[in-house]
Image: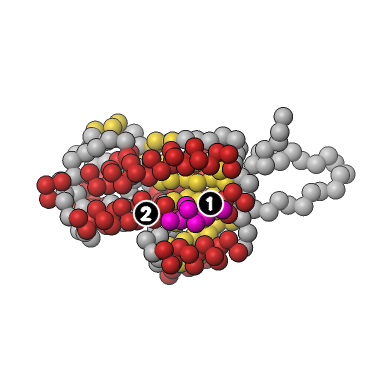
Amino acid sequence: MTSNPQSIPVPAPLGAPADPAPAALRAVVTGASSGIGAATVRALRSTGWDVIAAARRIDRLEALAGETGATPMSLDVTDQASVDAFTAEVTAAGPIHALVNNAGGAFGTEQIAEARTEDWERMYAVNVLGSLRVTRALLPALRAGRQGSVLFLTSTAALAAYEGGAGYCGAKAAQESMARSLRLEEAGNNVRVIEVAPGLVHTEEFSLNRLGGDQGAADKVYQGVEYPLTADDVASTVAFALNAPHHVNIDQLVLRPLAQAANHKLLRGS
Ligand code: 8X3
């Protein structure tokens, strides 16, 4: 039986010299400045990971870094030059053991008859092409770490269509497809590929961004839903999947609030 590097260590017998503490595993989390990304940084730090918290809004990252001990780094996943500079700096410091492709979001709720091309371009740029750029750039460092994980934060929107969701559903389904291909391509390099697909998550910014900054409209999305998922609910699921022994590949993990029995069935109180 082979031992797994992420298994719980067996204590040394009494009197035996202690092994030096193993170096912490290193994770990159994109879109780390708020919501699920920031919560994931906290969850991974609290379970012993070295975390590089990456996002465009460096001021927010500095605060998160002060709180958690993560390393803040500027990254715009839609800009190849930014990804290149980020990759050079991160990989110079050693291998990577996990990449959490969290940067993304939804823009607009228009049906296809009224869809705004620029919203779709933005959704594909950040969710799909952003994940591609960062994953492609960090794969050599993930392979070098000899126990790599790439985790895609998708959505239940990837699993079923809904009116006004075509652009977002399509972008999330594209990420899901990317995860499936990558799993086949990288298994031989000991890189596992995980997809976490949450349903309704109440974060500060998701619906606000989607609805063009209209706080009233954003609040209505969650109105009467006593317990939507929180960013921490999702982050603890991400940490669970990444902390599983490395031979355990959780292909796809779907989580919804109890009140959302299906994408189209959301129970609201009065
Ligand atoms: C967000 C879930 O239902 O708004 O990823 O598409 S939903």
Q: Is residue 114 left or right of residue 25?
A: left
**Magenta segment, which residues?**
133-140
In percent of the image, x 39 and y 55: which residue is there? 130
Dominant SS of magenta comes to helix
Q: Is residue 161 left or right of residue 94?
A: left
Q: Is residue 40 above or below residue 264?
A: below
Residue 159: x, y in percent? Answer: 32, 36
Q: Which residue is mark 2?
A: 129
* Mark 1 neighbour class, 10 Å CA radius: few under 14, some 14 to 19, many 20 or more: many
Name the image quarter holding the N terminus: top right
Give how far apart the Cα atoms at labels 1 and 2 are. Answer: 15 Å
Residue found farthest to the top:
1
Magenta segment: does it hold 58?
no
Q: Is residue 48 left or right of residue 137?
A: right
In percent of the image, x 34 and y 56: which residue is there? 126
Q: Which residue is mark 1?
A: 139
> In terms of depth relative to the viewer, which is nearer, 82 or 188?
188
Residue 109: x, y in percent? Answer: 19, 49
Choose the circle earlier in sequence order: 1 or 2: 2
In percent of the image, x 68 and y 54: which residue is there? 23
